[in-house]
Image (cartoon, helix red, strand yellow):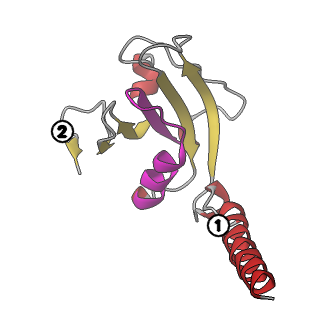
Amino acid sequence: MRGNYLFYAILIIVLILLGWMLTDTFTQPGLGELSGEYRELGKYRNENNTGPVQRIYAVEAKERQWEDMRAYGNLMPHTKYGRTQVYFFDAGTINLGQSLVPDPEAPHFSEELQGKCIAKYEKSPMGEVSFIKHPFQSSSFDE
């Protein structure tokens, strides 16, 4: 009789843990929860799978909501010891049919596009985050 109670107690604990894990899995925050409108225009990822992975994204932002841009960057994939960079461009200045594929070498975009960049999010190889408004202007600053 005592064995049945132990079995049911363990079964209940396992079911509670399973329900908790499933709830946590399906309620993760995503890009749809951001208040601004963002559209990925292009991306680059190097082919190196054994060393540092470099990811560069070009994203169109309809509004200049700095905290949402930072949150968007936080939601992008990042690999330990890799570098993730997200460049945000003002929607009014980019041709909507234009696809932007970033160049793997800095500054990643032509001078014409650099002037249209409104923010840059970067996560370093050690996980440090920087967010810079107007990164290609000489008076840009890190927040």
Q: Could you say where residue 140 lies in the image, as x and y percent from the top left? A: 22, 40
Q: Label 1 crowding class (10 Å Cα cut-off): few <14, some 14-19, many 20+?
A: few
The residue that appears at 29% across and 42% down in the rendered structure is: 128
Task: Indicate the secondary structure of the residue bearing disc 2.
Answer: loop
Pointer 2 or 1: first along the chain: 1
Q: Is residue 142 above or below residue 37?
A: above
- Point out residue 112 in the picture as x, y percentages from the top left corner: 44, 21
Would residue 27 be found to the left or right of residue 82 on screen? right
Q: Quadrant of residue 2?
A: bottom right
Question: Which residue of the protein is positioned furthest toward the front in this rendering?
Answer: 1
- The quadrant of the image that shows the N terminus is bottom right
Q: Is 140 on the left-hand or right-hand side of 104?
A: left
Q: Is residue 70 magenta?
A: yes
Residue at the spot 81% in from the left edge and 83% down from the top edge: 4
Span colored in magenta: 67-90
Residue 71 vs residue 97, the one in the foreground: 71
Give the spatial CA distance, label 2 vs label 1: 42 Å
Answer yes or no: is residue 73 visible.
yes
Res 116 seen here: no
**Amino acid at circle 2:** Ser
Comparing 128 with 17, the one in front is 17
| Residue type beneath disc 1 | Asp
Q: Which residue is mark 1?
A: 24
* Element type where label 1 sits in the image: helix
Number of marks in picture = 2
For disc 2, the marked residue is 139
Circle nearer the viewer, 2 or 1: 1
- Say whether residue 65 is left or right of residue 38: left
Position in image of residue 49 (x %, y %):
53, 15
Expressed as whole percent of the image width and height from the top left, the position of residue 95 reads: 64, 31
